[in-house]
């Protein structure tokens, strides 16, 4: 657990008509934690993350970022948050450099530091040569990286990334993962949803699994790794995930495939 509560969800519920997408989720994330948010398609991850960003109103419960309620104090809460939605929202008619400069100013980065901050992010995302091109002309991966850079700029206390690693090349995945690890080491907090389980296992310090809108597992990296060495049935994070989401029948096939591919 981290030192200071950066994100607090208390009994959060959200339905769409008769469909209960988020069903009583309580979760506290502290500074220094890098938390994986896992679960099947439709489990409720994006709905939860959108609610954290204040983009959709929850039916009941409470969400606080650095102590600020996202509904009572939306501006204060948003000031502490960097969020990349699954469906990207960036200004398509700005260049990458203009977009990052705008976000840095909105975040309150002091004027003498803006250029340095923008430069650092463009380098991190390998977008220095594309800096003057309009975002609408970026490739899918480039657009996702500029959105991530926008979320990271100004070092907000909490970063929420919804499937942000989809379509990134291996070197960008490596560099951004390394950045996030350092960010957490410097007492930031990160919540990241992804279906790339091996990447999450390498990156994160804690693993939360959502299933039909409810948290069915919340385990630290150390506890997970201990379990993987002790449990004769599951050998990796995918096996753990399948077991927790009621798909144990697939674990045998998974293990057989792993043995086969290791033998090739
Ligand atoms: N605006 C909406 N109107 C109606 N139903 C919605 C809406 N947004 C989400 N849902 C439903 O809520 C459930 C949870 O969706 P959500 O997008 O949170 O899942 P997810 O865990 O992010 O899935 P994925 O891994 O596919 O991104 C789904 O059944 C989805 O169809
Ligand atoms: Mg989603």
Image (spheres, rainbow, N blue to C red):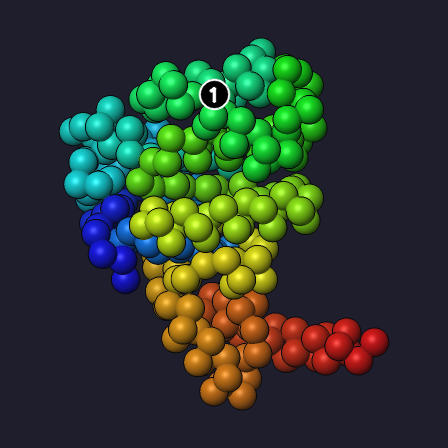
In screen coordinates, is 111 left or right of 66? right
Residue 19 in the image: x percent, y percent?
38, 44
Residue 142 visible here: yes
Q: Quadrant of residue 61?
A: top left
Tell me the quarter of the image containing the N terminus: bottom left
Residue 200 in the image: x percent, y percent?
52, 58
In screen coordinates, is 93 left or right of 57? right
Picture residue at 31% right of the left edge, 40% below the top: 157
Residue 213 in the image: x percent, y percent?
37, 52
Residue 44 visible here: no
Work out which residue is located at the far front of the displayed protein and give it.
Answer: 112
Picture residue at 47% right of the left edge, 20% below the top: 115
Camera-nearest residue between 69 and 31: 31
10 Å crowding of disc 1: few (<14), some (14-19), many (20+): some
Q: Which residue is mark 1?
A: 115
In screen coordinates, is 51 left or right of 174? left
Query: Taking 199 as reference, is 167 above or below it?
Result: above
Tell me the quarter of the image containing the C terminus: bottom right
The verdict on label 1 being within 8 Å of ligand 2 is no
Picture residue at 53% right of the left edge, 62% below the top: 202
Camera-nearest residue between 248 and 123: 123
Query: Taking 227 as reference, is 246 above or below it?
Result: above
Q: Quadrant of residue 227?
A: bottom left
Query: Taking 186 as reference, is 236 above or below it?
Result: below
Query: Taking 84 as reference, is 2 above or below it?
Result: below
Q: Secondary structure at mark 1?
A: helix
Picture residue at 21% right of the left edge, 52% below the top: 4
Residue 240 in the image: x percent, y percent?
50, 72
Q: How many marks?
A: 1
Work out which residue is located at the far right of the displayed protein and give it.
Answer: 264
């Amino acid at each position: 657990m981290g030192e200071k509560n950066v994100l607090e969800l208390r009994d959060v519920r959200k339905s769409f008509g008769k469909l209960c997408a988020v069903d009583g989720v309580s979760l506290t994330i502290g500074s220094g934690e890098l938390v994986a948010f896992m679960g099947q398609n439709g489990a409720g991850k994006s709905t939860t993350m959108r609610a954290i960003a204040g983009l959709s109103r929850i039916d009941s419960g409470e969400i606080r970022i650095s102590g600020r309620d996202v509904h009572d104090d939306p501006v204060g809460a948003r000031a502490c948050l960097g969020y990349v939605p699954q469906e990207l929202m960036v200004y398509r008619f700005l260049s990458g450099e203009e977009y990052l400069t705008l976000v840095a100013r909105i975040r309150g980065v002091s004027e003498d530091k803006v250029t340095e901050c923008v430069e650092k992010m463009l380098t991190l995302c390998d977008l220095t040569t594309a800096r003057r091109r309009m975002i609408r002309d970026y490739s899918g991966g480039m657009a996702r990286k500029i959105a991530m850079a926008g979320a990271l700029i100004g070092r907000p206390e909490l970063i929420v990334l919804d499937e942000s690693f989809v379509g990134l090349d291996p070197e960008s995945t490596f560099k951004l993962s390394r950045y996030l690890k350092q960010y957490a080491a410097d007492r930031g907090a990160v919540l990241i949803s992804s279906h790339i389980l091996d990447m999450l296992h390498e990156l994160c310090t804690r693993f939360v699994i959502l299933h039909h809108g409810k948290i069915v597992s919340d385990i630290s990296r150390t506890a997970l790794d201990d379990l993987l060495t002790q449990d004769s049935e599951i050998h990796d994070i995918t096996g753990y995930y399948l077991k927790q989401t009621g798909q144990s029948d697939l674990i045998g096939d998974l293990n057989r495939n792993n043995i086969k591919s290791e033998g090739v």
